[in-house]
Amino acid sequence: MGLGLIGSIIVGGIAGWIASNLMKANTGILTNIVLGIVGAVVLNLILQMLGIYASSSVVPQLIVGIAGACGLIWVVRRIRS
């Protein structure tokens, strides 16, 4: 059982907000939510290819979302520069 839609939005928003603060990216709430959700999805896919499966509870997904969102911010900065 996963987090569900509302849980994913909440965790994604928190993860995106934390990543935005860590990476000093001034993004809005909608961008934070998207960064957190997309970052979690992308990093979960990469981890699964490596045989690593993050639990579907809040804390592991929050950690994966933060790491994934930081990665996305980093990639966007590299593309823009």
Image: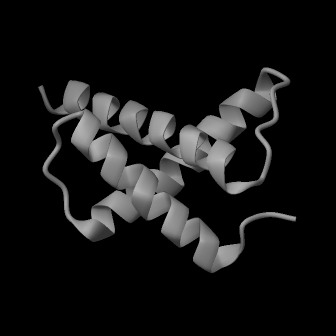
Q: Quadrant of the C terminus?
A: top left
Residue 16, x across and y down, in percent: 38, 52
Q: How is the image coloured?
A: one colour
Is 61 placed left or right of 53 in the picture?
left
Is 26 placed left or right of 13 in the picture?
left
Q: Give the residue at x 70% y 38%.
A: 45
Q: How many marks?
A: 0
Q: Quadrant of the N terminus?
A: bottom right
Q: Give the residue at x 66% y 55%.
A: 58
Residue furthest to the front: 59
Residue 4 placement: quadrant: bottom right
Q: Nearer the viewer, residue 44 or 55?
A: 55
Residue 73, x across and y down, in percent: 30, 37
Q: Is residue 39 above or below residue 9?
A: above
Q: Give the residue at x 85% y 24%.
A: 51
Residue furthest to the top: 50
Is 38 placed left or right of 77 in the picture?
right
Residue 9, x across and y down, in percent: 52, 70
Q: In this view, does 8 lie above or below 46?
A: below
Q: Give the residue at x 79% y 32%.
A: 48
Q: In this view, does 49 lie above or below 19?
A: above
Q: Nearer the viewer, residue 73 or 18?
A: 18
